[in-house]
Amino acid sequence: MNNLSQGHPPKNRLTRTTVIRVLTAIAVILAVILLLDKIAPHLPAAENWIRDQGIWAPVFYILLVCLLTLICFPMDVLFIAAGMIFGLWWGTLYLIIATMTSQSIIFLVSRHLLRSRVEKWMMHRPKMRILNKAIELRGAQLLFLIRMAPIPASPVTYLMGVSSMRFSRFLAATTGILPVAFASMYLGYAAVHWANTTNKPKHHFGLQDIEIYVGLIAAIAGSAYIGHTARKALIEAEKEINGAEKIDEA
């Protein structure tokens, strides 16, 4: 049985998890900044090229997300790319479309094409079996919270494809990804803004810069808090499963 379900986890363990998430976010920001510092002079040309593609730029992005998530590629990278390529508002729109479309495709592929393979895969992974039981117990409400936790989205979607959950409830619960996805997308948007402004010798730090960087801090802090809350809900569900299994064994 997963050690998360054995009693109440120590508070320092949850604190450690939150600290690790914040430090990871800071590391990603620094990495993006270092990379953008090298390519900043080429950003105007890249932005012009993207504009020249017209409607095909978001179409290619959405198709790429759908393809890569099928093989469980990390979605955070794709979310950051949306902010870097399309900016804040268009990036948010394309991110929502790409996320909901890609997860719907994975769910349907799992349910109708790969059911037996996914079930075999799940049988060899105790943590995924526990996760499946927890969602069966709590339903779409728990899945909504899990979507906010630092758990890879695509494997969970494959798991839901072989569960008893209806597609409509799955789709509603999957919107839980969006707040965390927005935080990652905002990171990409803020990183490009930083690169563009530092590449302009006459740029003066102003109100817009403050709004963007305060928004970034708020997005990271909100993402960490949401993940912490979702993790606590998952732990409680696992404890219920553990208690039910002990009753069955008695």
Image (cartoon, rainbow, N blue to C red):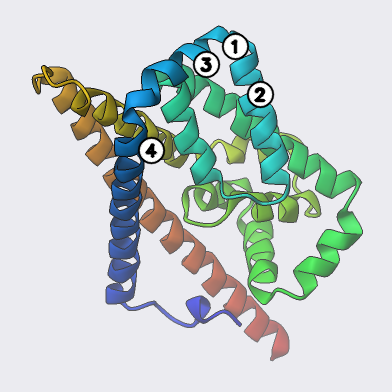
Q: How many other residues sit within 10 Å of disc 2, few (<14), some (14-19) or many (≥20)?
A: few
Asked if marks 2 and 1 touch (Cβ < 8 Å), the reply is yes
Q: Which of the two discs, 4 and 2, labels the residue nearer the N terminus?
A: 2
Label drawn at residue 183: 4
**What is the number of the mark on residue 53?**
1
| First reached walking from the N terminus: tag 4 or tag 3 | 3
Quick check: 105 above or below 126? above
Q: Residues within 10 Å of mark 4 (few under 14, many from 20)?
A: many
Instruction: In this rendered view, identify the residue nearer to me: 92 or 133.
Output: 92
Q: Position of residue 234 (x, y in %)?
A: 51, 62
Residue mark closest to the camera, 4 vs 2 = 2
Gap between marks 4 and 2 measured at Cα: 22 Å
Lateral position of residue 228 relative to residue 55, left or right: left
Q: Nearer the viewer, mark 4 or mark 3?
A: 3
Q: Is residue 176 visible?
A: no
Amino acid found under the numbered disc labelled 1: Gln
Q: Is residue 4 above or below residue 80?
A: below
Task: Judge depth for marks 2 and 3 and give the one in front.
Answer: 3
Amino acid on which disc 4 is placed? Ala
On-image quarter of the C terminus: bottom right
Pointer 1 with pointer 3, Cβ within 8 A: yes
Residue tagged by mark 3?
50
Label disc, if present, on residue 60 of the rendered structure = 2
Q: CA distance from mark 1 to mark 3?
A: 5 Å
Res. 102 image quadrant? top right
In primary-sequence order, the first of circles 4 and 1 is 1
